[in-house]
Image (cartoon, grey):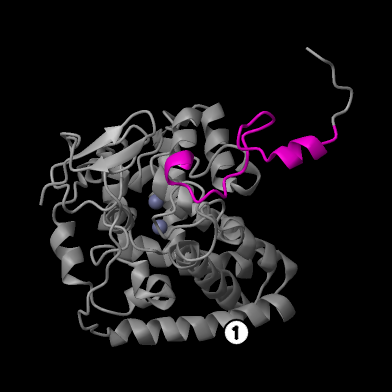
Amino acid sequence: MDFDSEIDHCSLRILPNTVKMAPNIKDGTDLNGVLFEDDASTPDMALARAPIQHADSHPRQLVWRNIILFAYLHVAALYGAYLFLFSAKWQTDIFAYILYVMSGLGITAGAHRLWAHKSYKAKWPLRVILIIFNTMAFQDSAIDWARDHRMHHKYSETDADPHNATRGFFFSHIGWLLVRKHPDLKKKGKGLDLSDLYDDPILRFQKKYYLILMPLACFVMPTVIPVYCWGESWLNAFFVAALFRYTFILNVTWLVNSAAHKWGHKPYDSSIKPSENISVSVFALGEGFHNYHHTFPWDYKTAELGNNRLNFTTNFINFFSKIGWAYDMKTVSDEIVKNRVKRTGDGSHHLWGWGDKDHAKEEVAAAIRINPKDE
Ligand SMILES: [Zn+2]
Ligand SMILES: [Zn+2]
């Protein structure tokens, strides 16, 4: 198939079948989303055609081992939630909360923004902190997480996307972990370049010893510390700090794939499912600004500036950039964001400020201006 198309630089509107695609897109027929900056083929960082949303009728093969494990985990987590509220010591509750934030950052600042997207760079001490946090989150090794996530962006909403949201809320939330992988995912996954991940000895070490490190970080350490440090019972420590905390952060991560692919505005690109979901952002440490993130996935903030109050992960990275451990953070210019919002947004973007030409005249007229001066 030929995807040559032309871009009218004035209106930034794409005219089909007239212009050349960027030379770096080797398999343009496959791509369904920009993953890295150089995948883009329009001046406002999009592919030169509308994305496809597709799920075929491939029969789903259930993986009973996972179904039973996840069912047990959720029942145990409900019991853990009960103990969290009515039985555990306050130190254990605070400890579980701290572990939730730490393991969350291992996913958001580590596996997601650093390793899957390369949206910033980190010196080895920060990479060690993030790999410890990441192992506490038990969502597979960072290399495997980043591989799945690159597929999710590159082949978004198609059968090669591990949690293809066109298959519905349940599938994109947890269902994808309960069935065998779609053959498209396996086939196209082979073409994915993961050399940057395998080049990092810290990531290789985690993957090699994962089956030893993960149980220690995710289950043993969270249970032992409350028992020995403040005399918590084994039962409370295990069900609250290990199982409840683990299942909670799992579901928060999954909500980014399910809820933030379903509910919310689409100010940057109305042709895709990912949406701006504030509630998800609060729990997912800033990862719910998902329409922005799928539009500009290499931006380390995963959101426009101004959303930092809800973006704990961005503040975490900014802190480490102050002490020099995080550097080379990539972000998208205002100009590109504006052009993209105008061309493909759904009109829900907030105004850039006073004097914005999209500002409704009635609102401008009704605004209270304190001490105005004629210039
Ligand atoms: Zn997504
Ligand atoms: Zn992402």
Name the foreground residue: 124 vs 340: 340
Residue behind mark 1: 79
Q: Amino acid at mark 1?
A: Tyr
Q: Which quadrant does ligand 1 occupy?
A: bottom left
Name the foreground residue: 347 vs 153: 347
Q: Where does the image place residue 341, in percent across and percent down from the top left? A: 48, 41
Which quarter shows the C terminus?
Answer: top right
Q: Where does the image place residue 245, in percent across and percent down from the top left? A: 56, 69
Q: Quadrant of residue 140?
A: bottom left
Task: Name the residue located 54 percent from the left edge and 66 percent from the top edge.
Answer: 222
Q: Where does the image place residue 147, in percent across and percent down from the top left? A: 27, 55
Q: Residues within 10 Å of mark 1 (few under 14, many from 20)?
A: some
The magenta stretch is: 341-368
Residue 23, compared with residue 165, is above or below; it is above
> Of helix, strand and loop, which one carries label 1?
helix
**268 with respect to 159 (left or right):** right
Task: Name the residue located 29 percent from the left edge and 38 percent from the top edge.
Answer: 40
Name the foreground residue: 76 vs 336: 336
Point out the residue furthest to the left here. Answer: 1
Q: Is residue 110 visible?
A: no
How many marks on residues?
1
Residue 316, compared with residue 227, is above or below; it is above
**237 with respect to 296 (left or right):** right
**Which secondary structure type mostly characterizes the magenta part of the structure?**
loop
Residue 51, compared with residue 54, is above or below; it is above
Q: Is residue 363 magenta?
A: yes
**84 with respect to 370 (left or right):** left
Q: Is residue 164 magenta?
A: no
